[in-house]
């Protein structure tokens, strides 16, 4: 199982778990840990997950942050249309708050 660097795990919190869907049933594993409110990333290929892990580690070590266009959940349709139009300059992110 791939592991995030300690400093990243500390920032994410103690609730971080990795589940290998090739080695076990993901639904059963989630049930064992009490479910999940959020699934951060799903990857069907271990090589792709290694790339994600490397990107997270690099961002954590260098302070790189994404540039986002933030929309409240109430504006989901506007956000989606903006993204699909090709006019979004940065990553489009929905938030639960205002």
Image: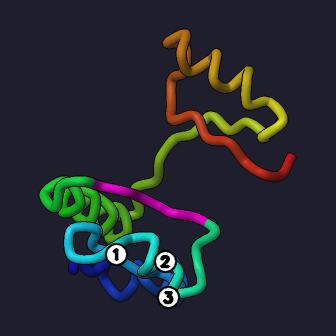
Report x, y in % for residue 86: 49, 12
Q: Find residue 30 and name its label.
A: 2
* Picture coordinates of residue 35, whole percent (x, y): 58, 77
| Residue placed most toward the observer, 93 or 74 | 74
**Earlier along the polypeptide chain: callout 2 or callout 1?**
1
Q: Outermost residue toward the left?
A: 47
**Considering the numbered disc 3 on the image, is that residue within a helix, a strand or a loop?**
helix
Is 83 drawn above or below residue 85 in the view shown? below
The residue under label 1 is 19
Q: Are marks 2 and 1 in contact (CB under 8 Å)?
A: yes
Kindly state the secondary structure of the residue where label 2 is placed: helix
Tell me which residue sits at (27%, 73%) in the image: 20
- x, y (%) of residue 3? 27, 80
Residue 40 in the magenta stretch? The answer is yes
Q: Which residue is the site of mark 3?
A: 32
Crowding near pointer 3: few (<14 within 10 Å), some, many (20+)?
few
Q: Is residue 29 magenta?
A: no
Q: Residue at x 42, y 80 (%)?
A: 29
On residue 78, the disc is none
CB contact under 8 Å: marks 3 and 1 = no
């Amino acid at each position: 199982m791939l592991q995030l660097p300690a400093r990243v795990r500390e920032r994410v919190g103690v609730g971080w778990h990795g589940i290998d869907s090739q080695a076990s049933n993901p639904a059963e594993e989630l049930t064992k840990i009490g479910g999940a409110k959020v699934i951060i990333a799903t990857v069907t290929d271990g090589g792709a997950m290694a790339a994600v892990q490397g990107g997270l580690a690099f961002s954590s070590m260098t302070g790189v942050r994404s540039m986002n266009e933030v929309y409240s959940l109430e504006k989901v349709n506007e956000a989606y249309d903006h993204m699909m139009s090709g006019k979004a300059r940065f990553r489009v992110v929905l938030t639960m708050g205002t």
